Amino acid sequence: MQPPDNYYWSRFTAIHGISGKDTMNAPSFDQIWHQIAPHIENQNVVAHNGFGFDFPVLNKTLEYYGLKIPVYNKFCTYKIYKSNLANLCEKFEIELNHHDALSDARACGELFRMHLNK
């Protein structure tokens, strides 16, 4: 999806490799929220550093577009394990292509599954 004004902070582009050229023809958040919302509303949502980044960013984005913030359960694997994602994946031998969104999400999900199975 395209961020407002298709603007990217250069530090995030350096980390994730995504820039304005990648999203210049993509829909904006408010145009696709209806597709995303069912995966968040009244669901358990797990993120690594979720309270420090992901959950506040989602809230600010929804506020920016005048969309209602959904009710959902928030879980943070950083808060659970108190270590960064790369170190945890190395420790628990979880495959990780760090800062690739899908790889990070799968690793975070695996960490949360391990936590639930304790």
Image (spheres, helix red, strand yellow):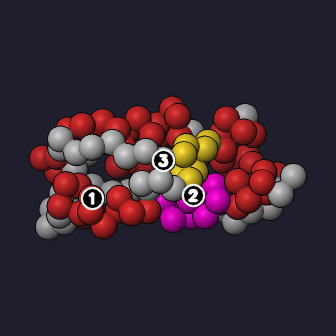
How would you rate the neighbour count of disc 2 (Cα within 10 Å): few for under 14, some for 14-19, many for 20 or more? many
The residue shown at (69%, 66%) is: 95
Q: Amino acid at mark 2?
A: Asp
x and y, in percent, of residue 47 in the image? 56, 48
x and y, in percent, of residue 56 in the image? 41, 35
Q: Secondary structure at mark 1?
A: helix
Q: Nearer the viewer, mark 1 or mark 2?
A: 1
The residues tagged by marks 3 and 1 sit, at their Cα atoms, a distance apart of 15 Å
Q: Earlier in the sequence, mark 3 or mark 1?
A: 1
Which region is colored magenta? 99-109
x and y, in percent, of residue 4 in the image? 16, 46
The residue shown at (17%, 51%) is: 6
User: Of the numbered discs in the image, which one, if any, rests on residue 33?
Assistant: 1
Q: Secondary structure at mark 3?
A: loop
User: Of the numbered discs in the image, which one, if any, rests on residue 104?
Assistant: 2
Prevailing SS of the magenta stretch: helix
